Image (cartoon, helix red, strand yellow):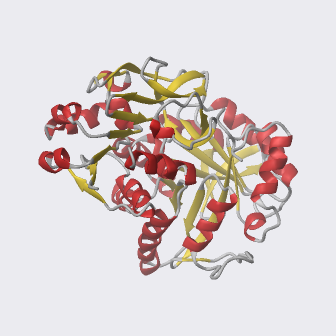
């Protein structure tokens, strides 16, 4: 099994690589389109600001490559957000894989949401053996609105989509690589898809 | 619901934990990785590693430690101590740290907060503030509370929030080490005046102190060292008691 973590300059990819190592999988970091295309599974990470992250994707041509991938792809945090239609952050046009807009939490709550919250209404093989209301670690100021493609919801200010799926594309707002053994189970499920 | 976080803090010198740690099931209590793994198992929500090495050589060992922690520990962690530049932060994040905490370097050069937030995102920038109540005014102090500044706690906290800090770690020097409870009045004021998470630090002695800092102090997270290291308050017991008091925790 060849697992590639897309390395385009955004985010804490070391943690994701280490999490897979704990599961006995050696993940390769790459921004080479050919290497990404032939991988069995692809992780699309991201931490930071949406607009500058999209610029980095465009600069390397990955913005056209990613939506055309046929193997399972898992977007994490900002990675998930960039797979959506648009983001209020920096007024950014996303990859448009998921037909949902990314918005900012209001100041009625503390922003960013930082810490452990539950995921509910789980519906995807990605959550095999994961209990309803399992705790996940989240750090984010922007969220995906509740939508058709949601496979998990979380409540902060209101219910929002904390995981998305469309065909071979998966996205999670939380950090499975930082969410203890439950998070590791989700990564294991992704490998076994 | 977003839960309140419990954060053990480990002091690190030359790559080893310094404060005495009394964990029966540890092979090597001085090994930060071993200790961090234990805390993750016991239900800690996050960890903070504070580098108190005085030498450059000691600082360098921090990178190896961060790399090892990231490799073996599956919960988030923050690294603080001696961080004063974008390059310092870049190196620590590359090693796998999730967040960094800056303190005196931000007071000396406040633009550092903007630079870090712009380059790495607010989510990884924790600003630690040590303050003392001097005749009714909370004054920011440096160097472990020994050097007073001109800054007022609340003004400074608001300034770093505007500059892009993602979180405030507030230690009351009046409460630190007393085991008499957290500085809940100041904490509640911070929580009301700011819109980013506040971590309470300094004064933890009993489970009731944690209940108070979440209820009265409106803290989003509570940090402590010795009560955890010496097993005076097992994290699981603490979280169960918090839950009994209707405080949302991850169990």
Tell me: B235 left or right of B88: right
Tell me: A50 left or right of B100: left
Callout count:
0
Q: Answer with the quarter of the image where residue B89 lies.
A: bottom left
Q: Does B104 appear above or below B52?
A: above
Q: Does A156 appear above or below B232?
A: above
- Can you give x and y, in whole percent of width and height, for residue B26 in the image? 67, 78
The answer, for residue A111, to whether it is visible in the render is: yes
The answer, for residue B103, to whether it is visible in the render is: no
- Can you give x and y, in whole percent of width and height, for residue A73 in the image? 31, 39
Q: Answer with the quarter of the image where residue B34 lies.
A: bottom right
Q: Answer with the quarter of the image where residue A130 lies.
A: top right
Of residues A141 and A189, the one drawn nearer to the viewer in this rendering: A189
Quarter of the picture holding the N terminus of chain B: top right
Residue at image location 60% in from the left, 22% down from the top? A157
Residue at image location 36% in from the left, 40% down from the top? A74
Of residues A66 and B103, the one drawn nearer to the viewer in this rendering: A66
- Can you give x and y, in whole percent of width and height, for residue B231 in the image? 79, 68
Tell me: B185 left or right of B117: right
Residue at image location 45% in from the left, 74% down from the top? B59
Q: Does A179 appear above or below B58?
A: above
Residue at image location 47% in from the left, 56% down from the top? B105
- Can you give x and y, in whole percent of width and height, for residue A66 in the image? 22, 35
């Amino acid at each position: 099994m060849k697992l590639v973590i897309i390395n385009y300059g955004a985010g804490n990819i070391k943690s994701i690589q280490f999490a897979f190592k704990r599961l006995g999988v050696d993940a390769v970091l790459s921004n080479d389109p050919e290497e990404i295309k032939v991988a069995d599974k692809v992780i699309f990470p991201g931490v930071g600001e949406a607009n500058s992250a999209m610029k980095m994707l465009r600069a390397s041509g990955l913005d056209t490559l990613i939506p055309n991938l046929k193997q399972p792809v898992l977007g994490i945090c900002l990675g998930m957000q960039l797979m959506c239609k648009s983001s209020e952050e920096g007024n950014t046009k996303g990859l448009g894989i998921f037909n949902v807009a990314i918005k900012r939490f209001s100041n009625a709550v503390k922003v960013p949401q930082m810490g452990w919250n539950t995921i509910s209404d789980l519906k995807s093989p990605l959550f095999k053996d994961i209990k309803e209301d399992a705790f996940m670690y989240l750090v984010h100021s922007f969220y995906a609105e509740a939508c058709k493609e949601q496979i998990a919801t979380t409540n902060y200010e209101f219910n929002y989509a904390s995981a998305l799926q469309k065909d071979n594309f998966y996205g999670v707002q939380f950090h499975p690589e930082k969410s203890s053994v439950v998070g590791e189970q989700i990564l294991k499920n992704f490998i076994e898809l | 619901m977003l839960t309140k976080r419990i954060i053990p803090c480990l002091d690190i010198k030359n790559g080893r934990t310094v404060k005495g740690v009394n964990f029966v099931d540890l092979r090597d209590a001085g090994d930060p990785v071993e200790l961090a793994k234990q805390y993750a198992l016991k239900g800690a929500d996050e960890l903070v590693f504070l580098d108190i090495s005085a030498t450059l050589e000691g600082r360098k060992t921090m990178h190896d430690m961060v790399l090892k922690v990231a490799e073996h520990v599956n919960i988030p962690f923050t690294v603080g101590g001696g961080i004063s530049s974008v390059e310092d932060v870049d190196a620590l994040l590359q090693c796998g740290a999730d967040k960094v905490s800056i303190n005196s370097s931000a007071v000396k050069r406040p633009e550092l907060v903007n630079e870090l937030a712009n380059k790495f995102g607010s989510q990884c920038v924790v600003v630690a503030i040590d303050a003392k109540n001097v005749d009714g005014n909370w004054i920011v102090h440096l160097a472990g509370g020994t050097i007073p500044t001109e800054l007022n706690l609340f003004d400074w906290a608001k300034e770093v929030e505007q500059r892009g800090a993602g979180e405030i770690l507030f230690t009351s020097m009046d409460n630190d080490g007393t085991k008499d409870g957290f500085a809940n009045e100041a904490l509640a004021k911070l929580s009301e005046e700011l819109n980013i998470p506040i971590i309470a630090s300094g004064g933890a002695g009993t489970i009731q102190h944690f209940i108070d800092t979440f209820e009265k102090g409106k803290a989003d997270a509570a940090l402590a060292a010795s009560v955890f290291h010496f097993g005076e308050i097992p994290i699981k017991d603490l979280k169960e008691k918090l839950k009994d008091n209707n405080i949302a925790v991850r169990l």
